[in-house]
Amino acid sequence: MMLTPVILSGGVGSRLWPLSREHYPKQLLALVGDNTLLQNTIIRLAGLDEQAKPLIVCNEKHRFLVAEQLYNIGIEPANIILEPEGRNTAPAVAVAAFAALARDPEAILIVLPADHLIADTATFCETIKTGISLAEANYLVTFGIIPKSPETGYGYINATDSIENTVALSVESFVEKPDLATAKNYLESGEYYWNSGMFMFKAAKYLQELEKFAPEILGTCRLAIDNALEDKKFLRLDSGAFKSCSSDSIDYAVMEHTNSAVLIPLDAGWNDVGAWSSLWEVSEHDNNGNVTLGDVLTENVTNSYLRAEHRLLAAVGVENLIIIETADAVLVANKDQVQDVKQIVSQLKATKRSETELHRKAYRPWGYYETIDIEERFQVKRITVNPGSSLSLQMHYHRSEHWVIVKGTAKITKNDEVFVLTENQSTYIPIGTKHRLENQGKIPLEIIEIQSGSYLGEDDIVRYEDVYGRDI
Protein backbone atom coordinates (compact mmCIF):
# COMPACT_ATOMS: atom_id res chain seq x y z
CA MET A 1 0.00 0.00 0.00
CA MET A 2 1.26 3.45 -0.93
CA LEU A 3 -0.27 6.82 -0.21
CA THR A 4 -1.51 8.65 -3.28
CA PRO A 5 -1.27 12.43 -2.85
CA VAL A 6 -4.18 14.31 -4.38
CA ILE A 7 -3.36 18.00 -4.77
CA LEU A 8 -6.38 20.26 -5.26
CA SER A 9 -5.25 23.25 -7.31
CA GLY A 10 -8.53 24.64 -8.60
CA GLY A 11 -9.00 27.74 -6.45
CA VAL A 12 -8.93 31.40 -7.47
CA GLY A 13 -7.85 33.17 -4.27
CA SER A 14 -9.86 36.34 -4.87
CA ARG A 15 -9.02 37.80 -1.45
CA LEU A 16 -5.37 38.05 -2.58
CA TRP A 17 -6.27 40.25 -5.54
CA PRO A 18 -4.62 42.05 -7.34
CA LEU A 19 -1.74 39.54 -7.23
CA SER A 20 -3.98 36.47 -7.44
CA ARG A 21 -6.22 36.36 -10.52
CA GLU A 22 -8.35 33.77 -12.25
CA HIS A 23 -5.70 32.92 -14.85
CA TYR A 24 -2.83 33.07 -12.33
CA PRO A 25 -4.22 32.22 -8.87
CA LYS A 26 -2.48 32.24 -5.50
CA GLN A 27 -1.37 28.60 -5.50
CA LEU A 28 0.82 29.35 -8.53
CA LEU A 29 2.49 32.35 -6.87
CA ALA A 30 5.67 32.49 -4.80
CA LEU A 31 4.14 34.43 -1.92
CA VAL A 32 6.61 33.29 0.76
CA GLY A 33 10.08 32.17 -0.32
CA ASP A 34 11.25 31.14 -3.77
CA ASN A 35 8.81 28.30 -4.48
CA THR A 36 5.12 28.64 -5.22
CA LEU A 37 2.46 27.39 -2.81
CA LEU A 38 1.75 24.46 -5.17
CA GLN A 39 5.43 23.51 -5.30
CA ASN A 40 5.78 23.68 -1.52
CA THR A 41 2.69 21.50 -1.05
CA ILE A 42 4.40 18.74 -3.02
CA ILE A 43 7.90 19.30 -1.65
CA ARG A 44 6.78 18.88 1.97
CA LEU A 45 5.50 15.37 1.17
CA ALA A 46 9.12 14.22 0.85
CA GLY A 47 9.01 13.57 4.61
CA LEU A 48 6.46 10.78 4.17
CA ASP A 49 7.38 7.16 3.53
CA GLU A 50 6.55 5.39 0.27
CA GLN A 51 4.08 7.29 -1.82
CA ALA A 52 2.72 7.06 -5.33
CA LYS A 53 3.12 9.81 -7.89
CA PRO A 54 0.77 12.70 -7.11
CA LEU A 55 -2.53 13.35 -8.82
CA ILE A 56 -3.08 17.04 -9.50
CA VAL A 57 -6.60 18.38 -10.05
CA CYS A 58 -6.62 21.83 -11.62
CA ASN A 59 -8.58 24.12 -13.89
CA GLU A 60 -7.98 23.56 -17.58
CA LYS A 61 -6.85 27.18 -17.94
CA HIS A 62 -3.91 26.55 -15.58
CA ARG A 63 -2.68 23.28 -17.08
CA PHE A 64 0.57 24.49 -18.65
CA LEU A 65 1.50 26.62 -15.64
CA VAL A 66 0.96 23.65 -13.32
CA ALA A 67 2.93 21.30 -15.57
CA GLU A 68 5.84 23.74 -15.79
CA GLN A 69 5.94 24.28 -12.03
CA LEU A 70 6.05 20.52 -11.40
CA TYR A 71 8.80 20.12 -14.00
CA ASN A 72 10.84 22.87 -12.36
CA ILE A 73 10.98 20.93 -9.07
CA GLY A 74 11.58 17.56 -10.74
CA ILE A 75 8.13 16.07 -10.07
CA GLU A 76 6.41 13.78 -12.57
CA PRO A 77 2.72 13.48 -11.65
CA ALA A 78 0.65 10.38 -12.20
CA ASN A 79 -1.81 12.66 -13.97
CA ILE A 80 -2.87 16.27 -14.17
CA ILE A 81 -6.65 16.04 -14.17
CA LEU A 82 -8.27 19.00 -15.91
CA GLU A 83 -11.55 20.43 -14.69
CA PRO A 84 -13.41 22.27 -17.47
CA GLU A 85 -15.09 24.26 -14.70
CA GLY A 86 -14.60 24.33 -10.94
CA ARG A 87 -17.20 22.21 -9.10
CA ASN A 88 -15.79 22.32 -5.54
CA THR A 89 -13.91 19.62 -3.64
CA ALA A 90 -16.34 16.67 -3.54
CA PRO A 91 -16.33 16.15 -7.35
CA ALA A 92 -12.60 16.96 -7.61
CA VAL A 93 -11.71 14.24 -5.11
CA ALA A 94 -14.18 11.82 -6.71
CA VAL A 95 -12.48 11.95 -10.11
CA ALA A 96 -9.08 11.66 -8.41
CA ALA A 97 -10.34 8.60 -6.50
CA PHE A 98 -11.45 6.92 -9.73
CA ALA A 99 -8.06 7.69 -11.31
CA ALA A 100 -6.19 6.32 -8.27
CA LEU A 101 -8.24 3.10 -8.18
CA ALA A 102 -7.37 2.45 -11.83
CA ARG A 103 -3.74 2.12 -10.68
CA ASP A 104 -4.17 0.66 -7.20
CA PRO A 105 -7.42 -0.94 -5.97
CA GLU A 106 -6.28 -0.39 -2.36
CA ALA A 107 -5.26 3.24 -2.89
CA ILE A 108 -5.28 5.52 0.15
CA LEU A 109 -5.58 9.19 -0.73
CA ILE A 110 -4.01 12.08 1.14
CA VAL A 111 -6.00 15.08 -0.08
CA LEU A 112 -4.27 18.46 0.23
CA PRO A 113 -5.22 21.95 -0.96
CA ALA A 114 -2.40 23.46 -3.03
CA ASP A 115 -2.53 26.89 -1.42
CA HIS A 116 -1.62 26.41 2.25
CA LEU A 117 1.49 27.25 4.25
CA ILE A 118 2.86 24.81 6.85
CA ALA A 119 5.87 25.96 8.85
CA ASP A 120 6.73 22.69 10.63
CA THR A 121 7.06 20.11 7.86
CA ALA A 122 8.41 17.38 10.15
CA THR A 123 5.43 17.56 12.50
CA PHE A 124 3.07 17.72 9.53
CA CYS A 125 4.48 14.50 8.06
CA GLU A 126 4.47 12.67 11.39
CA THR A 127 0.83 13.66 11.95
CA ILE A 128 -0.12 12.50 8.47
CA LYS A 129 1.49 9.10 9.14
CA THR A 130 -0.72 8.59 12.20
CA GLY A 131 -3.75 8.65 9.93
CA ILE A 132 -2.73 5.72 7.75
CA SER A 133 -3.91 2.95 10.08
CA LEU A 134 -7.22 4.78 10.57
CA ALA A 135 -7.72 5.04 6.81
CA GLU A 136 -6.88 1.35 6.47
CA ALA A 137 -9.63 0.68 9.03
CA ASN A 138 -12.11 2.48 6.73
CA TYR A 139 -12.30 5.75 8.65
CA LEU A 140 -12.55 9.06 6.78
CA VAL A 141 -9.84 11.14 8.42
CA THR A 142 -9.73 14.92 8.50
CA PHE A 143 -6.93 16.96 10.05
CA GLY A 144 -8.16 19.68 12.39
CA ILE A 145 -5.92 22.62 13.21
CA ILE A 146 -5.50 23.32 16.93
CA PRO A 147 -6.78 26.93 17.14
CA LYS A 148 -4.54 29.68 18.49
CA SER A 149 -7.11 32.49 18.42
CA PRO A 150 -10.88 33.03 17.93
CA GLU A 151 -10.73 33.25 14.14
CA THR A 152 -13.92 34.23 12.31
CA GLY A 153 -12.52 33.49 8.85
CA TYR A 154 -12.35 29.71 9.25
CA GLY A 155 -14.90 26.93 9.48
CA TYR A 156 -14.68 24.76 12.59
CA ILE A 157 -15.02 21.07 13.42
CA ASN A 158 -16.43 19.89 16.75
CA ALA A 159 -14.61 16.71 17.82
CA THR A 160 -14.71 15.19 21.31
CA ASP A 161 -14.55 11.50 22.18
CA SER A 162 -11.27 9.70 21.57
CA ILE A 163 -11.11 6.73 19.21
CA GLU A 164 -9.70 3.84 21.24
CA ASN A 165 -5.93 3.29 20.93
CA THR A 166 -5.51 6.19 18.49
CA VAL A 167 -4.81 9.93 18.55
CA ALA A 168 -8.06 10.57 16.66
CA LEU A 169 -11.29 12.10 17.90
CA SER A 170 -14.86 11.37 16.84
CA VAL A 171 -16.31 14.13 14.66
CA GLU A 172 -19.54 15.53 16.07
CA SER A 173 -20.27 18.33 13.58
CA PHE A 174 -18.92 20.78 11.02
CA VAL A 175 -19.82 24.43 11.59
CA GLU A 176 -19.62 27.46 9.34
CA LYS A 177 -17.50 30.55 10.00
CA PRO A 178 -18.71 31.93 13.36
CA ASP A 179 -19.06 35.45 14.70
CA LEU A 180 -16.41 36.61 17.20
CA ALA A 181 -18.36 35.72 20.35
CA THR A 182 -19.03 32.20 19.09
CA ALA A 183 -15.41 31.77 18.02
CA LYS A 184 -14.28 32.74 21.54
CA ASN A 185 -16.59 30.10 23.01
CA TYR A 186 -15.18 27.50 20.60
CA LEU A 187 -11.64 28.37 21.65
CA GLU A 188 -12.42 28.20 25.36
CA SER A 189 -14.20 24.84 25.07
CA GLY A 190 -11.16 23.05 23.65
CA GLU A 191 -13.50 20.89 21.56
CA TYR A 192 -13.34 22.80 18.28
CA TYR A 193 -10.67 22.80 15.58
CA TRP A 194 -10.11 24.89 12.48
CA ASN A 195 -11.22 23.05 9.35
CA SER A 196 -8.04 22.57 7.30
CA GLY A 197 -9.62 20.96 4.24
CA MET A 198 -7.05 18.11 4.43
CA PHE A 199 -8.26 14.50 4.37
CA MET A 200 -7.07 10.90 4.26
CA PHE A 201 -9.14 7.85 3.30
CA LYS A 202 -9.32 4.85 1.05
CA ALA A 203 -10.36 5.91 -2.43
CA ALA A 204 -12.94 3.11 -2.50
CA LYS A 205 -14.37 4.08 0.90
CA TYR A 206 -14.80 7.71 -0.15
CA LEU A 207 -16.66 6.68 -3.31
CA GLN A 208 -18.79 4.28 -1.28
CA GLU A 209 -19.85 7.09 1.10
CA LEU A 210 -20.37 9.48 -1.82
CA GLU A 211 -22.72 6.95 -3.42
CA LYS A 212 -24.65 6.79 -0.16
CA PHE A 213 -25.02 10.52 0.47
CA ALA A 214 -24.51 12.21 -2.94
CA PRO A 215 -25.19 9.62 -5.68
CA GLU A 216 -25.69 12.30 -8.34
CA ILE A 217 -22.13 13.55 -7.83
CA LEU A 218 -20.78 10.01 -8.00
CA GLY A 219 -22.67 9.26 -11.21
CA THR A 220 -21.63 12.40 -13.08
CA CYS A 221 -18.00 12.04 -11.93
CA ARG A 222 -17.90 8.41 -13.07
CA LEU A 223 -19.20 9.51 -16.47
CA ALA A 224 -16.68 12.39 -16.60
CA ILE A 225 -13.74 10.06 -15.90
CA ASP A 226 -15.01 7.18 -18.10
CA ASN A 227 -15.22 9.55 -21.08
CA ALA A 228 -12.04 11.48 -20.25
CA LEU A 229 -9.39 11.95 -22.93
CA GLU A 230 -5.66 11.44 -22.44
CA ASP A 231 -3.86 14.49 -23.84
CA LYS A 232 -0.12 14.04 -23.41
CA LYS A 233 0.48 14.60 -19.67
CA PHE A 234 -3.11 15.72 -19.05
CA LEU A 235 -6.38 13.89 -18.41
CA ARG A 236 -9.28 15.92 -19.81
CA LEU A 237 -12.56 15.19 -18.03
CA ASP A 238 -15.69 14.93 -20.14
CA SER A 239 -16.85 18.55 -20.15
CA GLY A 240 -20.59 17.99 -20.41
CA ALA A 241 -20.71 15.44 -17.60
CA PHE A 242 -18.49 17.35 -15.20
CA LYS A 243 -20.19 20.70 -15.72
CA SER A 244 -23.55 19.07 -14.92
CA CYS A 245 -22.24 17.94 -11.52
CA SER A 246 -23.40 19.64 -8.32
CA SER A 247 -20.85 22.01 -6.81
CA ASP A 248 -20.39 20.73 -3.24
CA SER A 249 -17.56 20.46 -0.76
CA ILE A 250 -16.41 17.16 0.75
CA ASP A 251 -17.73 18.44 4.07
CA TYR A 252 -21.23 19.10 2.77
CA ALA A 253 -21.49 16.06 0.49
CA VAL A 254 -19.97 13.39 2.77
CA MET A 255 -18.25 14.34 6.01
CA GLU A 256 -21.29 15.96 7.66
CA HIS A 257 -23.35 12.78 7.08
CA THR A 258 -21.03 9.80 7.44
CA ASN A 259 -20.57 7.84 10.67
CA SER A 260 -16.96 7.16 9.74
CA ALA A 261 -15.50 10.66 10.15
CA VAL A 262 -12.65 11.14 12.61
CA LEU A 263 -10.33 14.04 13.32
CA ILE A 264 -6.61 14.08 14.04
CA PRO A 265 -5.41 17.33 15.70
CA LEU A 266 -2.60 19.08 13.83
CA ASP A 267 -0.26 21.72 15.24
CA ALA A 268 2.34 22.44 12.57
CA GLY A 269 2.21 26.16 11.88
CA TRP A 270 -0.67 25.92 9.40
CA ASN A 271 -1.97 28.96 7.53
CA ASP A 272 -4.42 28.90 4.63
CA VAL A 273 -3.13 32.24 3.25
CA GLY A 274 -6.73 33.34 2.92
CA ALA A 275 -6.03 37.08 2.97
CA TRP A 276 -3.24 39.64 2.87
CA SER A 277 -3.23 39.84 6.67
CA SER A 278 -2.23 36.15 6.74
CA LEU A 279 0.87 36.93 4.70
CA TRP A 280 1.74 39.78 7.05
CA GLU A 281 1.47 37.37 9.97
CA VAL A 282 3.76 34.67 8.53
CA SER A 283 6.38 36.98 6.97
CA GLU A 284 9.49 38.44 8.61
CA HIS A 285 8.88 41.93 10.03
CA ASP A 286 11.30 44.84 10.32
CA ASN A 287 11.74 46.86 13.53
CA ASN A 288 8.53 48.78 12.78
CA GLY A 289 6.42 45.67 12.25
CA ASN A 290 6.42 46.13 8.47
CA VAL A 291 6.80 43.59 5.67
CA THR A 292 8.27 45.19 2.54
CA LEU A 293 8.78 43.40 -0.77
CA GLY A 294 10.08 44.94 -3.98
CA ASP A 295 11.10 48.57 -4.49
CA VAL A 296 9.56 50.06 -1.33
CA LEU A 297 10.46 53.17 0.69
CA THR A 298 8.77 54.01 4.00
CA GLU A 299 8.79 56.89 6.46
CA ASN A 300 6.97 56.62 9.79
CA VAL A 301 5.08 53.49 8.69
CA THR A 302 4.18 50.72 11.14
CA ASN A 303 2.55 47.25 11.14
CA SER A 304 1.94 47.26 7.40
CA TYR A 305 2.46 44.93 4.41
CA LEU A 306 3.82 46.74 1.34
CA ARG A 307 4.53 44.89 -1.90
CA ALA A 308 5.74 46.50 -5.16
CA GLU A 309 5.79 44.37 -8.30
CA HIS A 310 6.70 46.92 -10.99
CA ARG A 311 7.32 50.44 -9.65
CA LEU A 312 8.66 52.34 -6.68
CA LEU A 313 6.15 52.26 -3.83
CA ALA A 314 6.53 54.99 -1.19
CA ALA A 315 4.44 55.31 1.98
CA VAL A 316 4.53 58.01 4.66
CA GLY A 317 2.82 58.24 8.03
CA VAL A 318 0.48 55.26 7.82
CA GLU A 319 -0.12 52.18 9.95
CA ASN A 320 -1.94 48.86 9.77
CA LEU A 321 -2.27 48.99 5.98
CA ILE A 322 -1.97 46.53 3.12
CA ILE A 323 -0.59 48.19 -0.04
CA ILE A 324 -0.11 46.03 -3.13
CA GLU A 325 1.18 47.47 -6.43
CA THR A 326 0.98 45.59 -9.74
CA ALA A 327 1.35 46.76 -13.33
CA ASP A 328 -2.34 47.53 -13.76
CA ALA A 329 -3.85 47.82 -10.26
CA VAL A 330 -3.10 49.10 -6.76
CA LEU A 331 -4.80 47.87 -3.60
CA VAL A 332 -4.88 49.89 -0.38
CA ALA A 333 -6.73 48.28 2.52
CA ASN A 334 -6.87 48.37 6.28
CA LYS A 335 -5.26 45.19 7.57
CA ASP A 336 -8.35 44.43 9.65
CA GLN A 337 -10.69 44.53 6.62
CA VAL A 338 -8.82 42.53 3.99
CA GLN A 339 -11.49 39.81 3.93
CA ASP A 340 -13.58 42.33 1.98
CA VAL A 341 -11.14 42.48 -0.94
CA LYS A 342 -13.37 39.87 -2.57
CA GLN A 343 -16.10 42.53 -2.70
CA ILE A 344 -13.84 44.62 -4.94
CA VAL A 345 -13.35 41.58 -7.15
CA SER A 346 -17.14 41.18 -7.34
CA GLN A 347 -17.47 44.81 -8.45
CA LEU A 348 -14.83 44.29 -11.14
CA LYS A 349 -16.63 41.18 -12.40
CA ALA A 350 -19.97 42.99 -12.45
CA THR A 351 -18.50 45.64 -14.74
CA LYS A 352 -16.64 43.00 -16.81
CA ARG A 353 -13.21 44.41 -16.02
CA SER A 354 -10.31 42.25 -17.20
CA GLU A 355 -8.29 42.88 -14.02
CA THR A 356 -10.03 39.96 -12.30
CA GLU A 357 -8.71 37.47 -14.87
CA LEU A 358 -5.38 38.56 -16.29
CA HIS A 359 -2.22 40.41 -15.39
CA ARG A 360 -0.45 42.61 -17.89
CA LYS A 361 1.92 39.64 -18.15
CA ALA A 362 0.02 36.58 -19.41
CA TYR A 363 1.64 33.13 -19.48
CA ARG A 364 1.23 30.69 -22.33
CA PRO A 365 2.68 27.19 -22.95
CA TRP A 366 5.27 28.71 -25.30
CA GLY A 367 6.33 31.57 -22.98
CA TYR A 368 4.52 34.79 -22.11
CA TYR A 369 3.50 38.21 -23.34
CA GLU A 370 3.25 41.51 -21.51
CA THR A 371 1.02 44.39 -22.55
CA ILE A 372 3.05 47.59 -22.73
CA ASP A 373 0.39 49.98 -24.03
CA ILE A 374 -3.19 49.72 -25.23
CA GLU A 375 -5.71 52.13 -26.70
CA GLU A 376 -8.93 51.76 -28.69
CA ARG A 377 -7.33 50.74 -32.02
CA PHE A 378 -3.79 49.68 -31.15
CA GLN A 379 -1.91 47.56 -28.63
CA VAL A 380 1.79 47.05 -27.99
CA LYS A 381 3.08 43.78 -26.49
CA ARG A 382 6.46 42.35 -25.55
CA ILE A 383 6.42 38.65 -26.46
CA THR A 384 8.93 36.11 -25.13
CA VAL A 385 9.08 32.65 -26.74
CA ASN A 386 10.98 29.90 -24.92
CA PRO A 387 13.74 27.99 -26.76
CA GLY A 388 12.26 25.21 -28.87
CA SER A 389 8.72 26.58 -28.59
CA SER A 390 6.30 27.96 -31.15
CA LEU A 391 2.97 29.75 -31.30
CA SER A 392 0.09 28.15 -33.15
CA LEU A 393 -0.41 28.58 -36.88
CA GLN A 394 -3.13 31.22 -36.71
CA MET A 395 -5.00 34.07 -38.35
CA HIS A 396 -6.84 37.20 -37.17
CA TYR A 397 -9.97 38.68 -38.74
CA HIS A 398 -9.79 42.11 -37.13
CA ARG A 399 -6.16 43.10 -36.60
CA SER A 400 -2.83 43.33 -38.36
CA GLU A 401 0.53 42.95 -36.58
CA HIS A 402 4.02 44.39 -36.88
CA TRP A 403 6.82 42.28 -35.35
CA VAL A 404 10.23 43.69 -34.39
CA ILE A 405 12.87 41.21 -33.22
CA VAL A 406 14.81 42.57 -30.24
CA LYS A 407 16.58 39.40 -29.04
CA GLY A 408 17.24 35.97 -30.53
CA THR A 409 16.30 34.47 -33.89
CA ALA A 410 12.74 34.04 -35.15
CA LYS A 411 11.49 31.53 -37.69
CA ILE A 412 8.38 33.07 -39.23
CA THR A 413 5.65 31.52 -41.35
CA LYS A 414 3.52 33.94 -43.36
CA ASN A 415 1.02 32.14 -45.62
CA ASP A 416 3.26 29.98 -47.86
CA GLU A 417 6.43 31.93 -47.07
CA VAL A 418 8.88 30.77 -44.36
CA PHE A 419 11.90 32.90 -43.39
CA VAL A 420 14.22 33.81 -40.51
CA LEU A 421 14.69 37.19 -38.85
CA THR A 422 17.29 38.29 -36.30
CA GLU A 423 17.75 41.28 -34.00
CA ASN A 424 16.60 44.68 -35.35
CA GLN A 425 14.73 43.09 -38.27
CA SER A 426 10.95 43.24 -38.66
CA THR A 427 7.95 41.99 -40.62
CA TYR A 428 4.29 42.92 -41.19
CA ILE A 429 1.37 40.47 -40.82
CA PRO A 430 -1.73 41.81 -42.66
CA ILE A 431 -5.27 41.00 -41.52
CA GLY A 432 -6.34 37.53 -42.66
CA THR A 433 -2.78 36.19 -43.09
CA LYS A 434 -1.92 32.75 -41.72
CA HIS A 435 1.17 33.11 -39.56
CA ARG A 436 3.34 31.44 -36.97
CA LEU A 437 6.24 32.52 -34.76
CA GLU A 438 8.87 29.94 -33.72
CA ASN A 439 12.03 29.96 -31.62
CA GLN A 440 14.41 27.27 -32.84
CA GLY A 441 17.35 28.82 -31.00
CA LYS A 442 18.87 28.17 -27.56
CA ILE A 443 18.04 31.51 -25.94
CA PRO A 444 14.62 33.15 -25.39
CA LEU A 445 13.23 34.98 -28.39
CA GLU A 446 11.91 38.46 -27.63
CA ILE A 447 9.85 40.57 -30.02
CA ILE A 448 7.82 43.74 -29.85
CA GLU A 449 4.38 43.27 -31.41
CA ILE A 450 2.30 46.25 -32.49
CA GLN A 451 -1.33 45.36 -33.17
CA SER A 452 -3.73 47.65 -34.99
CA GLY A 453 -7.33 47.13 -35.98
CA SER A 454 -10.98 47.43 -35.04
CA TYR A 455 -10.89 44.67 -32.40
CA LEU A 456 -7.89 43.55 -30.34
CA GLY A 457 -9.36 40.85 -28.07
CA GLU A 458 -7.53 37.59 -27.42
CA ASP A 459 -10.48 35.65 -28.84
CA ASP A 460 -9.78 36.98 -32.35
CA ILE A 461 -7.67 33.90 -33.13
CA VAL A 462 -8.39 31.18 -35.66
CA ARG A 463 -5.97 28.31 -35.03
CA TYR A 464 -5.06 25.90 -37.84
CA GLU A 465 -2.31 23.93 -36.07
CA ASP A 466 -1.30 23.83 -32.41
CA VAL A 467 1.23 21.55 -30.70
CA TYR A 468 -0.28 22.21 -27.25
CA GLY A 469 -3.73 20.73 -27.87
CA ARG A 470 -5.60 24.02 -27.68
CA ASP A 471 -8.87 24.42 -29.55
CA ILE A 472 -8.61 24.61 -33.33
Image (cartoon, grey):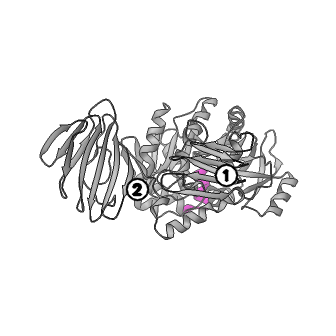
Residue 13 is inside the magenta segment: no
Between tags 1 and 2, which lies in front? 1
Residue carrying label 1:
316
Residue 351 image position (x, y, % from top left): 48, 70
Residue 40 image position (x, y, % from top left): 58, 37
| Residue farthest toward the bottom in the current orientation of the protein | 350
Say how many tags the image has.
2
Residue 210 is inside the magenta segment: yes
Side of 392 relative to 214 (left or right): left
Q: Is residue 155 above or below residue 72?
A: below
Determine the secondary structure under disc 1: strand
What secondary structure do most residues of the magenta stretch adopt? helix
Precedes in sequence: disc 1 or disc 2: 2
Give the residue at x 70% y 31%: 122
Mark 1 touching mark 2, by CB under 8 A?
no
Numbered tag placed on residue 238 in the rendering: 2
Residue 14 image position (x, y, % from top left): 57, 57
User: Between residues 151 and 146, which one lies in front from this camera angle?
Assistant: 151
Q: Mark 1: few, some, or many residues within 10 Å (few <14, many ≥20)? A: few
**Region of the chain picked out in magenta, as a range:** 206-215
Q: Is residue 456 above or below residue 421?
A: below
Amino acid type of the residue tagged 1 in the rendering: Val
Amino acid type of the residue tagged 2 in the rendering: Asp
Q: Quadrant of the C terminus?
A: bottom left
Residue 316 image position (x, y, % from top left): 67, 51
Quarter of the figure with residue 446: top left
